[in-house]
Each structure stands twice: as C-alpha cells, then as structure tokens.
Amino acid sequence: MTSIPFELRSTPTSRTPGSVPGVRERWRMGVEARALVLVTAVLLAVGLATVFSASFIEAQQKGFGATYYLSRHAIAAAAGIVGFAILAKLDAERFRPLAWPMMWASLGMMALVLLAGKINGSQRFAFGRSFQPSEFVKFAVVCWTAMMIVRKGERLRRFAKGVIPIMLVNGLLALLAFKQPDVSVALFYLALAGTLLFMAGARIGHFLVLGALVLPLAWQKLDGYVVARLCDFAPGTFSFVCVTTPEEAQRKADIGLQQYESLVALGSGGLTGVGYAEGRTQSGFLPHQISDFIASNIGEEWGFLGLAVVTLLYAAYGWLGFRIARDARSQFLQLVAVGCTLTTVTTAFVHLAVVTGLFPNTGLTLPFISHGGSNMLLSLAMTGVLVNIGSARERVAADPLPR
C-alpha cells in the first residue's frame, strides 16, 4: 500500500510556527473533505426530518410531546457535531500512540457492560440506556488494528506472528459482544479487522484457516433468537437447525412480522411515496421503526426515488472516504481512513439490505439518520477523523495589526 509523506506547506522558514512572529498553523480541508462535510450535512438533515415523521405518533401515545424523540436526536447530533469539529482539527496521527489504551478501555467497557441489567433481553447499555460501548469500540478496532499492521510490517504475511495475534485480540472483543448477545456487532469487529489485514497484504489462506476453526464453534453457540432470524430469512437453507417448539415459533413470528411490515411499507411507497408524515408504519405497525427499520419510513413516505437518493448519498460518502484514504499522509492514516469509511458505509448498506429483505434482520442502525445517540456520536466522530486525514496543515502569515 503506497502512502504519501506528510508535508507541511508553509512560508519559507526552518523554524517552527511558534518561533516565527506572525506565523500560525492551520488545517486546510481538501476537496474530498469539503464534499464529505456536505454529504454528511445532507444525511443529518434527512435524519432530523425522518425521525420526527417516524416518531411523533409514538411519542404522543406514550404521553410525551410530539417532538420528544426529535429533540433527543437533535441533542445527539449537536454533541456529535462538536466532536466532529474537534477531531477535524486534531492530527489523526495522535491516535497511533493511543491505540493500546483505547483497546484496553474497550475490553474493560465490554466486560463491565455484562454486569449491567438486561434491557429487551440483552446487556448492551451502560448508564441506563444512554451509552452503548460496542459502538465506540468500532473506532478502537480500527485504530488498534491499523497500528499493529504498521508495526508488524512484513511479518503480517506470517500466520503465527502476523495475523493470529491481531485476530486474537479482536476476537476477544467479538466474544464479549457475542455474550451480550450482539452477534451482528461481534461479526462486524472480525470482518472490519480482517478487511484491514487483507488490504495491508495478509494472505487470504490465513483467513480460510481461521474461518474453518472458528465458525463451527460459533455455530454451536448461536442462541435461539439468531437461529429464528436465519430460519425466517431462508427456512429452506437453514432447515436443519429450525425447530418448531412454541417458543421458537413465537420468535420466528415476531421477526417475520417486522420484516413483513417493512416490505409492506416499501410497497406502499411506490415510486414517489405517500407523502411526508403520511405513512402508516409510524402508527405502531413496525416495531423499532425509528432505529432498526427507519429506512422503511423513508421508502414509504418518499418512495423508491427517496430511498435511492439516500443510497447514493452513502455511496458518495464511501467514494469520498476511499479517495481520502488513497491520499493519506501515512500508511497508518490510510488504514484508519479505510476503517472509518467501511464502518459507516457497511452499516448503512446492511441496514438498507435488511429493510429490503436482502439480508436477515441484524439490528444495525442507519448512520446519521436512525435515532440513537451512540451511533450518531461515533459516525460524526469518524467523519471528523476522515476530514482531518483529508486536510493539509499549512503555515499562514498573519496580517500585521494596525498601529
């Protein structure tokens, strides 16, 4: 993987900016970074409009004001924008020495969350429902894996000294996510780390060996809810594990109802949609609509064309992110940019695939649009990091003050 060395564009001087009177240092965004900010802003605007449309009836039914969920979503977006602004001006190279502390903190948070009480049958939140550690761990996976890849260099092509140590640590994170249980996030950690390793030169045969060793063990530990999702999605393919006990039948019915209502919403929207805030799914027909299935609301109210525009926005986000990665200042930043881009874009396309029935239900939200503070903060923070990687630091001579 080629990299472009970091160059400090400056006025001619051999001293640091702090030692030159009237000279200051600033970050100047590149074209891709500016376009990424614009795409993100449009997605945020779509999210604010969609969350209100999808939630105002439910909010009123629960005795809240019509803007209850919109207000919470806007607060999360505002906090995320502050984080975005800070990280856009913070040199992303600083995350390299912080990679190990971030990984240790991630392991600690993922372990501690298992001691919390269950919410909707899972242990994924800390401090009530205000903080979901597994979301922020994704950034630690990106930074730590990128740091280890750079450190190992040519040893990365060796199974025992290259791939295994990196996948073992990420596998421990995946195991903790699996215990919550959150199988989608556990698989996401492994896929994200594996993709970065593969792009950096790891051999595909090593991953085939790991898959042959891990998949049979993981399959035996799948809980009933995951099996029910697979059976609902492709009953013929997974018939050998599908059972017909009353409990499993009820699980399958609940999951099937969610997928069925999503497809009904998309079908009702047709080409141009039924109109803003005119959909029927927000009346309680589709569970978790404002988070796990918010794209269904977009498809119903804005139609195929509206959903296609949103899909193209995420495609543009991915294209810009990979262009930023191509021109990054170092190999570490290239890998971080790829990881941040993949985290946002993959989550978005999996969500869209679930809503349209292409994938089994995973519970992944739609970045920048779905209601959920943790994912909003993570998505905007990663966008800030991408903007910084897509910027150049330059020295600027300040205008002299008038006497």
Image (cartoon, rainbow, N blue to C red):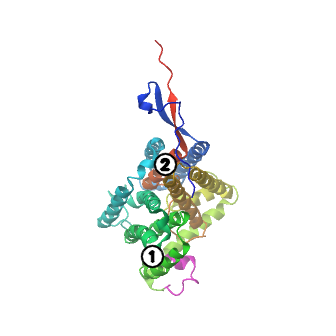
Residue sitting farthest toward the bottom: 240
Give the residue displayed 51% in from the left and 30% down from the top: 396
Placement of 64 over or under 141, stated as above or below: above
Give the residue displayed 40% in from the left and 61% down from the top: 134
Give the residue displayed 53% in from the left and 65% down from the top: 195
Q: Which residue in the protein does label 1 denote?
A: 225
Q: Nearer the viewer, residue 217 or 117?
A: 217
Q: Can you give x and y, in whole percent of width and height, for residue 175 in the image?
A: 39, 71
Tell me whether circle 2 and circle 1 mark residues in contact (CB < 8 Å): no
Res. 264 visible in picture: yes
Q: Amino acid at mark 2?
A: Val
Counting every numbered tag in the picture gives 2
Determine which of the numbered discs, if any, sits on residue 63 in the image: none
Q: Can you give x and y, in whole percent of width and height, for residue 136 in the image?
A: 41, 57
93 left or right of 45? left
Q: Can you give x and y, in whole percent of width and height, for residue 61 in the image?
A: 45, 56
Q: Nearer the viewer, residue 64 or 169?
A: 169
Q: Which residues are magenta?
A: 227-242
- Quadrant including the N terminus: bottom right
Residue sitting farthest toward the right: 271
Q: Can you give x and y, in whole percent of width and height, for residue 233 in the image?
A: 56, 76
Real-space Cα separation, disc 2 to disc 1, in angstroms:
36 Å
Comes first in the chain, label 2 or label 1: 1
Q: Amino acid at mark 1?
A: Tyr
| 10 Å crowding of disc 2: few (<14), some (14-19), many (20+) | many
Magenta-colored stretch includes residue 236: yes
268 left or right of 288? right
Q: Which residue in the protein does label 2 denote?
A: 385
Marks 2, 1: nearer the viewer: 2
Placement of 266 over or under 328, stated as above or below: below
Magenta-colored stretch includes residue 3: no
